[in-house]
Image (cartoon, rainbow, N blue to C red):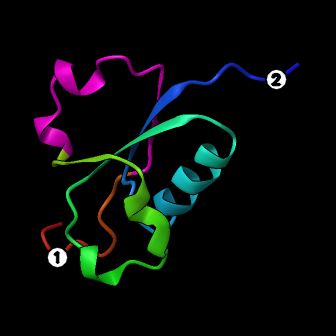
């Protein structure tokens, strides 16, 4: 039995893991909506990361409209070696 297509929000969609997860979920037929603050946009490892729609936003600014129509959220956002810690 084939899974029903879902709209999935991926936080950290431009990160090391998030970029790959977005690509793989798209291959499975899901609609991917990314969310990333794009701090490291110049350091992308996966050139396909921009092929899905995304919201350029910090997680602290998420609102109800950002989740409209979303069936699932996969939270992968985080700052590696954040000097503010």
The quarter of the picture where residue 60 lies is: top left
Q: What stretch is highlighted in magenta?
A: 59-76
Is 70 on the left or on the right of 66, as rendered? Answer: right
Q: Is mark 1 on a helix, strand or loop?
A: loop
Name the residue: 37% across, 62% down. 50
Using the image as rendered, state which of residue 56 and residue 62 is in the foreground: 56
- Across and down, in percent, residue 11 comes to 36, 45
Quarter holding the N terminus is top right
Q: Is mark 2 on a helix, strand or loop?
A: loop
Is 70 on the left or on the right of 29, as rendered? Answer: left
The reply to whether the C-beta atoms of the residues labelled 1 and 2 are less than 8 Å apart is: no
Is 81 on the left or on the right of 25, as rendered? Answer: left
Q: Is 8 located above or below residue 45 in the figure? A: above
Quarter holding the C terminus is bottom left
Q: Is 1 located above or below residue 45 in the figure? A: above
Name the residue: 26% across, 74% down. 40
Q: Is 74 located above or below residue 27 in the figure? A: above
Name the residue: 64% across, 36% down. 29
Q: Is 40 located above or below residue 75 in the figure? A: below
Which residue is labeled 1 in the image? 83
- Across and down, in percent, residue 51 comes to 42, 58
Which residue is labeled 2 in the image? 2
* Foreground disc of the pair 1, 2: 2
How crowded is the residue under tag 2: few (<14 C-alpha within 10 Å), some, or many (20+)? few
Spatial CA span between label 1 and label 2: 45 Å
- Across and down, in percent, residue 79 comes to 29, 64
Name the residue: 17% across, 33% down. 62
Q: Earlier in the sequence, mark 1 or mark 2?
A: 2
């Amino acid at each position: 039995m084939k899974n029903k297509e879902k709209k999935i929000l991926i936080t950290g969609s431009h990160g090391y893991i998030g970029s790959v997860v977005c690509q793989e979920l798209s291959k499975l037929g899901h609609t991917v909506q990314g969310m990333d603050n794009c701090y490291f946009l110049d350091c992308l490892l996966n050139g396909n990361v921009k092929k899905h729609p995304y919201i350029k936003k910090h997680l602290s600014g998420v609102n109800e409209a950002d989740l409209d129509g979303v069936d699932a959220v996969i939270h992968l956002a985080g700052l590696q070696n954040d000097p503010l810690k």
